[in-house]
Image: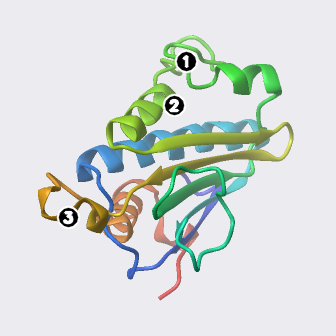
Amino acid sequence: LGEAYTVRVDVSPQLPRVLAEPGDLEAMLINLATNSRDAMAEAGHGVLSISATVVGAPEASTAAPDLPGGEWVRIVVADTGVGMDPEVLERAMEPFFTTKPLGRGTGLGLALAREFAERSGGLLRIESVPGSGTRASLFLHPASEAGPAAATDASVARTVKNTLSHRAGPAGNIHAPG
């Protein structure tokens, strides 16, 4: 991501595994982090935060009360970039829609992230405020909910750690517990 940005990670190694292809989860995280980096580049600096929690369980907070029933793992990639106005936000997940200059983006990053979420039985939500940044929330089912028939699952903690260690840049700008 570069030295001008701080990466903060709050992902417990005790999170349940999620129903998702590990390589696809990594690609989705890279897409979201790249979009965040580009938005923060326009601002000149910034903080990228990646967190994950379990929501929807009876003992969990009401962080996502409108989700279909059951337990979900919510992965949040948030930045302090330039944010999006409501018109851009409405189109942000359309294939080939981009606000980047010619040659800098394909307009596929968020569309592919949404497609990954849906293919994995989850959903992707994007919230943004101009001048304040953007927050992408990916909701995936824990692998334990699928029982033994689950074709594949991914460790969120391991995927985030591996993605950051290979792609985020100097370790000095990554802040993670433990």
Q: Which mark lies nearer to you, 3 or 1?
A: 3
Q: How crowded is mark 3: few (under 14 residues within 10 Å), some or many (20 or more)?
A: few
Q: Where does residue 145 sit, x and y in percent of width and height? A: 30, 63
The residue lying at 33 percent from left, 36 percent from top is 119
Say above or below: 64 vs 58: above
The residue lying at 25 percent from left, 59 percent from top is 146
Q: Mark 1 points at which residue?
A: 94
Q: Mark 2 points at which residue?
A: 110
49 sits left or right of 147 in the view: right
Q: Quarter-wise, where is residue 84 in the image?
A: top right
Q: Where does residue 150 sit, x and y in percent of width and height? A: 17, 56
Mark 2: amino acid = Leu
156 sits left or right of 130 in the view: left
Q: Nearer the viewer, residue 119 or 163?
A: 119
Mark 3: amino acid = Gly
Q: Quarter-wise, where is residue 162 in the image?
A: bottom left
Q: Distance between the residues labelled 1 and 2?
A: 8 Å
Q: Mark 3 points at which residue?
A: 147
Extreme bottom residue here? 178
